[in-house]
Image (cartoon, coloured by chain):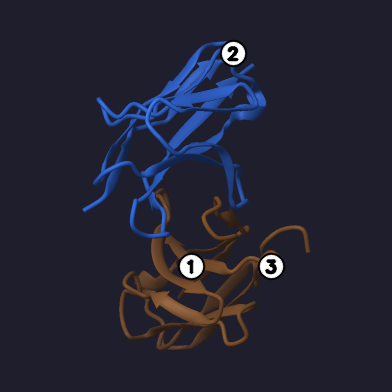
Amino acid sequence: GAGVSQSPRYKVAKRGQDVALRCDPISGHVSLFWYQQALGQGPEFLTYFQNEAQLDKSGLPSDRFFAERPEGSVSTLKIQRTQQEDSAVYLCASSSWGQPQHFGDGTRLSIL
Amino acid sequence: GDSVTQMEGPVTLSEEAFLTINCTYTATGYPSLFWYVQYPGEGLQLLLKATKADDKGSNKGFEATYRKETTSFHLEKGSVQVSDSAVYFCALRPVSGNKLVFGAGTILRVKS
């Protein structure tokens, strides 16, 4: 596709459930990023992949958060045992090496 | 650590007014600087960038100049339109690293 695609656009889950969020980056982009954006705030970095290698996961808030990119293309962000404070918009971005990041429209996650 | 500070909003202007949104940063060396814009329900779109001191980024009538001496990257536009209403984010990419560090965002509302 022409841009970064994220699915689902909206996800509602009950507290304690596991969720999986998908990101399809722009074709050929080696770098992929996940950010968390709380309401009224700027995005905050979660994790970074270069191809299939997860080079930086310093922003993941707890061990309930897990991300993978097994074939160096599509990435999945998984949150286990969701809690209310996980409610946010999760943004995915991709880029060619050294170039600006292109963002998807995000997944809005609401935990009830 | 690296950080970005933006002027608080919302900023409310009449159509054709002059716009300034202040942004200052804290970082080591010469980070790359960016302005992103987020329209309601959408992801972030790159508006402009600058990668070294005294560079001026420009796009769609918006401009920002990388000022190392004041560690600033203020966004300006000479004549705003209603369609410019959005949230504007200032961000930096550290010298060593790939992740973006964002400010909290500034809401711009333009009235006709």
Please tell me the numbered disc located at residue A34: 1
Asked if residue A38 can be seen in this view, the reply is no
* The C terminus of chain A lies in quadrant: bottom left
- Could you say which is closer to the camera, residue B101 or residue B55? B55
- The letter of the blue chain is B
The chain carrying label 1 is A
- Is A71 located above or below residue B99 in the figure? below
Which residue of the protein is positioned furthest toward the right in this rendering? A1
Q: Could you tell me how far apart the alpha carbons at marks 3 and 1 are, in whole angstroms?
A: 17 Å
- Could you say which is closer to the camera, residue B36 or residue B84? B36
Q: Could you tell me how far apart the alpha carbons at marks 1 and 2 are, in whole angstroms?
A: 35 Å
Q: Is residue A68 left or right of residue B101?
A: right
Q: Mark 3 points at which residue?
A: A28
- Could you say which is closer to the camera, residue A60 or residue A85? A60
- Is B29 located above or below residue B59 in the figure? below
Q: What element carries label 2?
A: loop
Q: Name the residue under label 2.
A: B79
What amino acid is found at the position of numbered circle 1 in the picture?
Trp
Q: What element carries label 3?
A: loop
- The letter of the brown chain is A
Residue pictured at 27% horizontal, 47% vertical: B3
